[in-house]
Image (tube, rainbow, N blue to C red):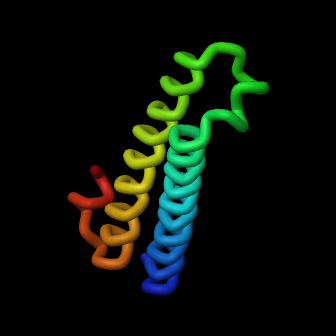
Amino acid sequence: VPMGVLSCVKYLMFIFNVLVFAGGTCLVGVGVWVAVDPAGFQDIVATKPVLSAGAYLLLAVGIALSLLGFLGCCGALRRSRLLLLV
């Protein structure tokens, strides 16, 4: 395999993992926003327990995606198979 192809794959994996990390960070931000200020979202969701459960679900999924994206970025830059498999 030519070295240019491996370098291209490395940077494509890095960019993809940066996008995953950014998406997870956005989900964490929205989850914190809904958890801190639920009054603005009560028009959208009729019942408050559903709203708080959704906020915590957004936080959990966002934290997991951010962690996976960060580990993927580190794995892509270091060419660490273990970090990429996580």
Percent position of residue 40, x then y: 72, 37
Q: Is residue 61 above or below residue 11?
A: above
Residue at point 78%, 25% (across, down): 43
Q: Is residue 4 above or below residue 71?
A: below
Q: How many marks?
A: 0
Picture quadrant where residue 69 is located? bottom left
Picture quadrant where residue 46 is located? top right
Query: Residue furthest toward the right?
Result: 43
* Closest to the observer, 31 or 72: 31
* Closest to the observer, 52 or 65: 52
Residue at point 29%, 52% (across, down): 85
Percent position of residue 57, x then y: 47, 31
Query: Residue furthest toward the left?
Result: 82
- Whether residue 19 sits left or right of residue 64 in the image: it is right
Residue at point 51%, 26% (across, down): 52
* Closest to the observer, 35 or 31: 35
Q: Quadrant of the N terminus?
A: bottom left
Percent position of residue 37, x then y: 60, 42
Q: Is residue 3 above or below residue 26?
A: below
- Whether residue 16 sits left or right of residue 43 in the image: it is left
Residue at point 44%, 77% (across, down): 6
Picture quadrant where residue 80 is located? bottom left
